[in-house]
Amino acid sequence: MAEPVSEQDQEFSELLGFLQDQKPEVQRAAAEGVLDHSENRAFVEYCRRHPRAAARPLLRLAERAEADAQAGEVAEKVVSQSAAGSENQKARLARDNALNTMEAGAAALKALVNLSAIPQVTEELVSLNAPKRITEALRSGWLEGRAGLAHWHAMILANITIGKVGQQALCVEDGMLRFLMAAYVTKPRPKARDGYNDPLLCLGKVLGNVCVLPEGRKIVAGEQGTGSISALIADLSERGRRADMMNALRNLCLDTACHEKIVSTDMFARMACFLYPFEKAEVERRAELPEAVRALLETEGSTLTGDVAVRTAAVATIIGLNGSLEGREYLRGFGCQEVLRAWTVEETDSFILAGLGASLRTVESTEEELKAADEQQEKEDAEAEASAAQEPNKVICCSPDSVEASKAPLPSADPAVNASSQGTDEHLKDIFSGIDGVD
């Protein structure tokens, strides 16, 4: 026997049902009602239990919103140009319908921004092919010279790609992701609107999210990878976009398959502009930097950013590059040793300091020293395994920390450091968590 439906649930069901009404004015009222309720705890819980009831009608309105906005503008012009009489009356009716449809679509978009943060709704949106439909809506408006609602599209895509299913859906077609990358770095940018100075800001979050997956990184750093990555690196100079770009670059650098493209750029020099405390460093220390890097820092200005998230992503980026020979040579060539030394003096975060210590030891070591350390570690590991095999009945007690670490083992950030015996590496294990395809 079905459970009785509460009066409140019945009201929510009817409200969502009105989104599919044939009358534009009813759709508008319903969409605005859903938007008003989209931060209401009871309504959010209802959508969590009935995600399709919310996702499907809202998506239909949202994907047409940009085109409906243009239709509303056209209808307004027709009314202003038509003479009095029956023709003018018809034009006014058409305009009112178009404006109601436009407002319904805009409200649906805003409501989806809030509701797409609900995991169950996100999964339903992905099943309805929302990543492609929203991207196509953004692209069609973009190509026709109208993208007045692009900021809402970008926010929805950012929410959808937080989870793996959304990331995978956006990577199905290379063209979708490449368009979003091109739109994000395009100049000049869309004008500020609705209080958002950078309407496409959330596309940076989308790029960082999809780079969690190997297929996403492959697209971003694909055949045209160097050019694409260079365009992203250029945005590091903008504080508003820096955190998102560092997140994307971090995910790329933690994958050694992307290093070939990364080392063809000046990424580290650009990073040094917000990592190296230039004025606080001694003159003789600055002289240790490569001339090109020093000139860039003098021209652009260089100081250690106060943004902990940016510094955390930056140290993870460096740890990732230290995972390959070409990455280590790249860092040394850009004066990484001096940048890390000066940064360490000013750093206060223990997690970041652990990463800096491991990274500095690696770049200061020769490849011969690193190789010898690797061989010694392999020998010690083999001896430990042989010793354990000789005592099959020995009970080994694991602390909760060691159990947790075994679930997400940390690849050694520094080949010269034993990850199992160095306390700093215990702090670093989370750097690689959540990045698919990175060993």
Image (tube, helix red, strand yellow):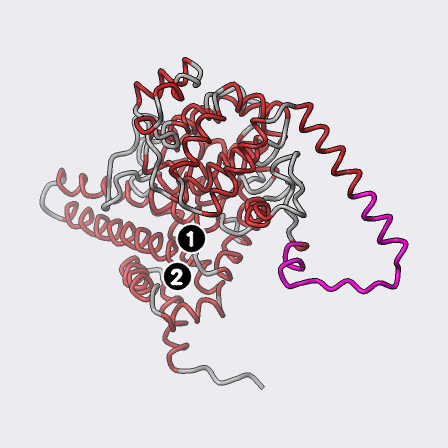
Query: Image quadrant for the N terminus?
Result: bottom right
Q: Is residue 23 above or below residue 142?
A: below
Quarter of the image where the C terminus is located: top right
State the residue at coordinates (36%, 37%).
241
Q: Earlier in the sequence, mark 1 or mark 2?
A: 2
Q: Which mark is residue 20?
A: 2
- Residue neighbourhood size for the residue with mark 1, other residues' Cα within 10 Å, grouped as few (<14), some (14–19), many (≥20): some
Residue sitting nearer the eye, 204 or 77: 204
Q: What type is the residue that disc 1 sits on? A: Arg
Name the residue furthest right. 390
**Horizontal side of residue 52 vs 306, given as left or right:** right
Write the residue at 44% across / 67% down: 47
Magenta-drawn segment: 381-405
The picture quadrant where one finds residue 11 is: bottom left
Q: Amino acid at mark 2?
A: Gln
**Dot 2 crowding, Cα within 10 Å, few <14, some 14–19, many 20+:** some
* Residue 60, label in figure: 1
Considering depth in this image, is 15 or 366 the residue closer to the camera? 366
Q: Nearer the viewer, residue 147 or 429?
A: 429
Give yes or no for residue 383 being in the magenta stretch.
Answer: yes
Of circles 1 and 2, the one toward us is 1
Asked whether disc 1 touches disc 2, contact meaning CB atoms under 8 Å apart, the reply is yes
Decide: is 431 above or below 345: below
Query: Residue 143: x, y in percent?
Result: 37, 30
**Position of residue 315 measured from the top left corner of the image (x, y, whole percent):** 49, 37
Label 2 SS = helix
Horizontal placement of 171 versus 35: left or right? right
